[in-house]
Image (tube, helix red, strand yellow):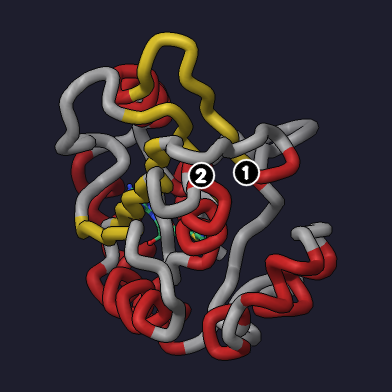
Amino acid sequence: MPSQIVTEDLKKIEEGIRGKYKQVAKSPEGQFKYPTGKKGLETLNYDRTVIENLPDAVASSYCGVGNPFSATNINEGDQVLDVGCGAGVDAIIASMMTGPTGHVVGIDIVPEMIGTAESNLKMTDRKNVAFQKTSGEDLPFPETTFDIVISNGVINLIPDKERALSEIFRVLKPGGRLAAADQAASGGIQKDLKARLSNWFQ
Ligand SMILES: C[S@@+](CC[C@H](N)C(=O)[O-])C[C@H]1O[C@@H](n2cnc3c(N)ncnc32)[C@H](O)[C@@H]1O
């Protein structure tokens, strides 16, 4: 855990994330400084055929910051974990790539997001995806379970990044891959932790 973050601040971060993403689960529109929904998928160069194959209601709930599929190939039969799956758009897309012989699990800490992901899944014909409410800091899977871990705009939200990454590498098979899209601060970081906390999930 980053040494300056005390328990009281951790509670504030978690409450803030739950509050924000409870709203995002209804609709991401107007909640972020970057394009979301179908426009977001197009801006981030997701495969055009993939976008066309998504029901509009599913595409409209997308709020990723990047395109994890530009970082690696997902192969037929792969076992995939999506850490911080949100509305499940990336998990559903990954399941199109693994085909029926592969399987995708999406996890998220916000129950409303899992609810939206499950409704989205019902709007598709995908049978090889499951969603589960749990934290990226404490993955409930045995070691060497997954071929690929994807993540999109999540690690920046997790206070204990070292622990989250060590959990990811624990559940990856030998030779497995992490494809993460994320936000990182560049230049000077605000020294005042209180100010940083207020910007954590804006
Ligand atoms: C940018 S969204 C993910 C977008 C998603 N990939 C999509 O397809 O639309 C970030 C997600 O990370 C989740 N999150 C934040 N902290 C988390 C944690 N500690 N463990 C798991 N998920 C977390 C949030 O609840 C939110 O749903």
Name the outermost residue toward the front: 101
x%, y% of residue 4? 36, 28
| Ligand 1 lies under 8 Å from the Cβ of mark 2 | yes
x%, y% of residue 36? 68, 74
x%, y% of residue 111? 23, 70
Q: Are marks 1 and 2 in contact (CB under 8 Å)?
A: yes
**SS for callout 2:** strand
Report the side of 130 relative to 197 (left or right). Answer: left
* Relative height, residue 118 to residue 16 (above, below): below
Q: Quadrant of residue 72?
A: top right
Residue 199 appears in the figure: no
Q: Residue at x 37, y 73 (%)?
A: 117
Report the side of 122 relative to 184 (left or right). Answer: left
* Mark drawn on residue 198: none
| Ligand 1 lies under 8 Å from the Cβ of mark 1 | no
Closest to the observer: 193 or 105?
105
Closest to the observer: 20 or 43?
43
The residue indicated by pointer 2 is 151
Tell me which numbered mark, 1 or 2, is placed earlier along the sequence.
Answer: 2
Look at label 2 and name its amino acid: Ser
Q: Residues within 10 Å of mark 2 (few under 14, many from 20)?
A: many
Q: Residue at x 34, y 59 (%)?
A: 129
* Mark drawn on residue 182: 1
Q: Residue at x 52, y 52 (%)?
A: 94
